[in-house]
Image: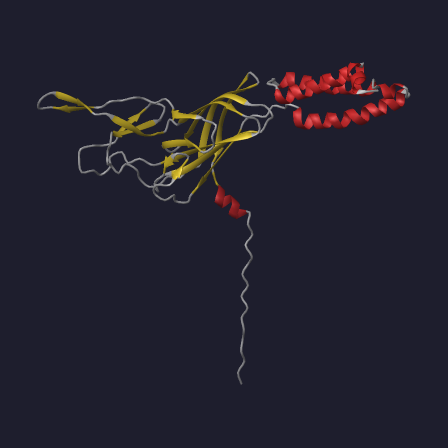
Amino acid sequence: MDLREFVTSPSGVAFGFAIAALTGVWFGRMNAPLSNFTVVIGIAALAVSVFLHPQLKLQGLTLRFWWTLAVSVPFGLASYYFLWAGFVPLNISSWTSKAIQPQGTVIGGITWSPVYALLRLDISNDSQFPVEDIDLVVKTEQPFVAAGEITQFNAELRWHDLVQVTPEWFEPKTGSRTAMPVDLLASTRGFRITSEKLPRRSRMEIVFAAASVSEYPAAPDKDKVLKVSFASGAHLWYAPKEHSLNVFGARPTISSVNVSGQYSVGGRLHTIAKDIQVTDYMETMMKGIKLPSASITRKTTWTH
């Protein structure tokens, strides 16, 4: 039998359908139920193709059955391993480093200061399907001062629930008021991360800088840091534009991070709300290293 006869035979048609179904799962954008149903149909079509193969038609049913199992089972196991879509939520982890970053070091587009505490957030898509429409809010117990992306998925990072304020300086003698433009320095309301797509089996890494804020820093002039507080307990800190105030205190310690929001997989919306413990990756690595114990040999000299 040549290739043309096989392609036009029932066995060839079933084989082509099986290949189309399995490759469609791999390259297509399907939700999990449709993907798994297509995998089952593809393996069933492969089994039919083997069972109806012209060279096996002359064999007995028992031999044809065993040949079908011998071909279909390995393909079925491989398809289950590589193509079966169990729901795999975003895997989010966080870590920090207590190492002091030198002044001017650039990490994720952030120009670093020794008073900044480093926080890294890993957002991993371990499934075989892209995660889309990611919209997350990240908060800690310490104020954030900046955020940036280390990877290159073009995630959009912006302050969460930013409030624009313009304080006014009132001069009692003249009754005049002068607007004082300010910049946001820090916020405990966190950052918002949005991204259109995180490809399958990929990881997005975001870096945050946190710092403690001195509400009334020592300064040679009347400029002060403006603190705006909310009933929720959140705080925003503002300072005059182009200020030279020493606004940050000692470098803080970050122990946990809160991540909340939503994303979609195959058109299905999923929500997330969790507190993540922040670990120091170097301390974790050192705990797993067993240093050789030092032994001291004492040499004693006897004299007569």
Single out the residue that lies furthest toward the left: 173
Position of residue 165 relative to residue 112, above or below, is: above
Residue 235: image quadrant is top left
Specify whether 80 is left or right of 201.
right
Position of residue 96 relative to residue 227, above or below, is: below
- Number of marks present in the image shown: 0
Single out the residue that lies furthest toward the bottom: 304
Q: Quadrant of the N terminus?
A: top right
Residue at the location (35% across, 26% down)? 234
Q: Position of residue 279 (x, y in %)?
A: 48, 39
| Residue 11 visible in rendering | no
Position of residue 118 relative to residue 292, above or below, is: above
Specify whether 118 is left or right of 304.
left
Specify whether 92 is left or right of 50.
left
Residue at the location (51% across, 44% down)? 284
Looking at the picture, tell me which residue is in the foreground, 54 or 165: 54
